[in-house]
């Protein structure tokens, strides 16, 4: 188990567009170790996902997983998914306002608009192609990680800076309203 140091907002690697991974790289022990380290680091930090550039590796690899996450108890489960060279494409104009946080932006949350329905295409760690429709908060998680790979942070998408809050103040003043609203949204869209 290797826990990597997570880059914090302000580090240049977070603003760098990650480069695509070749088939030969994907098959290498180095990249497979990076994938294992991403999984370990995400789980250790109670993240719902993490991108390679968050651990100082500017390659288009990310992992997502939600399984009774204490940071995001309202998120529907997402099985462990390794995303290599992912591409997301909105299917329509429907968006939802989600209060997001980020492992690279410690102790800060804010409201962002995310597409509700999207097509996601990626390779898994074995090089198998995936082409799936993602909806709701799961779609939001995929968009968040793909943003990282494009050098963007959720802070870039905050439309109203008055929604920025620390985790403590979110828990104290905003959590109940958000959880009620997002729980109804999850019930409506199913994920």
Image (spheres, rainbow, N blue to C red):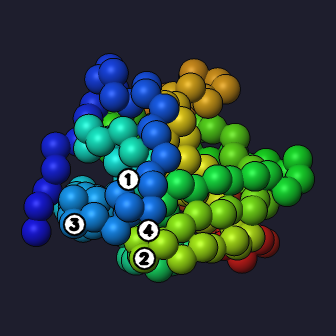
Instruction: Give the distance between the C-alpha atoms of the residues marked 3 and 2, in whole angstroms.
Output: 12 Å
Q: Earlier in the sequence, mark 3 or mark 4?
A: 3
Q: Earlier in the sequence, mark 2 or mark 4?
A: 4
Mark 2 or 4, which is nearer the eye? 2
Image point 26% across, 38% down: which residue?
Answer: 56
Which residue is the site of mark 1? 50
Image point 64% across, 53% down: which residue?
Answer: 87
Which residue is the site of mark 3? 29
Classify residue 181 by image quadrant.
bottom right
The circle drawn on residue 121 is none
How packed mark 3 is, by other alpha carbons closer than 10 Å (few <14, some 14-19, many 20 or more), is: few
Between 27 and 95, the residue placed more toward the observer is 27
Instruction: Give the distance between the C-alpha atoms of the residues marked 1 and 2, in whole angstroms.
Output: 19 Å
Q: Position of residue 106 (x, y in %)?
A: 30, 36
Q: Earlier in the sequence, mark 1 or mark 2?
A: 1
How packed mark 2 is, by other alpha carbons closer than 10 Å (few <14, some 14-19, many 20 or more), is: few
Cβ atoms at labels 3 and 4 below 8 Å apart = no
Which residue is the site of mark 4? 82
The answer to whether residue 102 is above or below residue 178 is above
Cβ atoms at labels 1 and 4 below 8 Å apart = no
Provide the secondary structure element on which disc 1 rests. Answer: strand
Q: Earlier in the sequence, mark 3 or mark 1?
A: 3
Quadrant location, the C terminus: bottom right
Count of residue discs: 4
Instruction: Give the distance between the C-alpha atoms of the residues marked 1 and 4, in whole angstroms.
Output: 10 Å
Instruction: Give the distance between the C-alpha atoms of the residues marked 3 and 1, in whole angstroms.
Output: 20 Å
Quadrant location, the N terminus: bottom left
């Amino acid at each position: 188990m290797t826990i990597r140091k997570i880059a914090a907002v302000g580090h240049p690697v977070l603003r760098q567009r990650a480069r695509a991974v070749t088939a030969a790289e994907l098959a290498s022990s180095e990249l497979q170790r990076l994938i294992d380290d991403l999984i370990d680091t995400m789980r250790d930090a109670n993240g719902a996902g993490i991108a390679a550039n968050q651990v100082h590796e500017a390659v288009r690899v990310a992992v997502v997983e939600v399984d009774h996450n204490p940071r995001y108890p309202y998120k529907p489960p997402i099985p462990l998914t390794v995303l290599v060279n992912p591409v997301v494409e909105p299917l329509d104009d429907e968006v939802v306002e989600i209060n997001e946080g980020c492992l690279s932006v410690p102790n800060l949350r804010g409201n962002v608009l995310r597409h509700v329905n999207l097509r996601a295409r990626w390779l898994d760690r074995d090089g198998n192609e995936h082409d799936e429709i993602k909806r709701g908060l799961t779609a939001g998680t995929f968009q968040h990680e793909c943003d990282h790979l494009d050098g963007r942070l959720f802070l870039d998408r905050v439309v109203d800076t008055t929604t920025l809050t620390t985790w403590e103040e979110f828990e104290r003043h905003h959590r109940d309203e958000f959880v009620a609203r997002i729980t109804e949204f999850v019930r409506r869209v199913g994920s």
